[in-house]
Structures are given as C-alpha cells and as structure tokens.
Amino acid sequence: MKAQELEHQDLLSGFIRMHILHHAAEDGIYGQWMIEELAEHGYRISAGTLYPMLHAMERRGYLSSSKTRLGRTYRRVYVATDLGRDALAQAKLKLRELFREIVEEARHS
Ligand SMILES: [Zn+2]
C-alpha cells in the first residue's frame, strides 16, 4: 500500500507543500486535518509521509508549531511564519505563470 500512496511524490510534493502553506497562512493546521483536506483534493497521503514534511518545513523556517491540549493528549498546530508567507507569495506567482503556460496555452493550441 505504501508504494501506491502519493504517486509521483517527487513531482507533486511541491504542490502539497504549497497547499500546506496556504492553509497554515490562513489558519492553524494540524496533521489529521491536513491529511483529510488533501484527500478531498485527491492526494492520498499518510501520517508517515505528512509529518516528516511538516517537520522539515518547520526546520526550514516556513512553519512554526505549538502544542495545544486536547483532553488528555496534545495536538501540534502549525502556522505559517513570515518566511512561509513570503515563500507562498512567490510560489503563487510562479504557479500562475506555470498555469498560464501549461493549462491555458495548451487549451488554445
Ligand atoms: Zn485546501
């Protein structure tokens, strides 16, 4: 099952990171919510793939996290940092440009 999860991972993981940043910039996110959100968009991703991604993004300064108490346990909530918002803004410009070329122009040719 593991091999099938997130097909073309190298290629698509940038989209997933952008998606994470998008929601982390709007509101705090946590792992399970993000897994379900991604599933709605057609990305099958497990906790074992998502969590290391979140940790790496935090290590690189795009996200910061804090623990929130949830009954007897804790939930780690991630928000986008200023660096993360900056990266997202740049990624959006690149995405728009790429979209224009590979989606819109293809439609007209
Ligand atoms: Zn979304």
Image (cartoon, grey):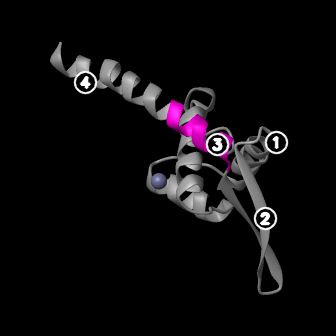
- Give the alpha-carbon distance from disc 4 to disc 3, as whole Å: 28 Å
Question: Can you tell which mark lies on residue 59?
Answer: 1
Q: Which residues are magenta?
A: 81-90
Q: In the current view of this chain or complex, which residue is farthest to the front?
A: 82
Three-letter code, disc 3: Gly
Label 4 sits on residue: 104
The prevailing secondary structure element of the residues shown in magenta is helix
Query: Which sits earlier in the primary sequence, circle 4 or circle 3?
Result: 3
Q: Is residue 103 magenta?
A: no
Q: Secondary structure at mark 1?
A: helix
* Other residues around mark 3 within 10 Å, as few (<14) / some (14–19) / many (≥20): many
Query: Which sits earlier in the primary sequence, circle 2 or circle 1?
Result: 1
**Residue 82 rendering spot, x and y as whole percentages:** 65, 45
Ligand 1 within 8 Å, label 4 CB:
no
Label 2 sits on residue: 66
- Give the alpha-carbon distance from disc 2 to disc 4, as whole Å: 41 Å
- Give the alpha-carbon distance from disc 1 to disc 3, as whole Å: 12 Å
**Residue 75 rendering spot, x and y as whole percentages:** 75, 71
Quadrant in which the C terminus appears:
top left
Give the total number of marks visible in the rendering: 4
Label 3 sits on residue: 84
In which quarter of the view is residue 29 placed?
Answer: bottom right
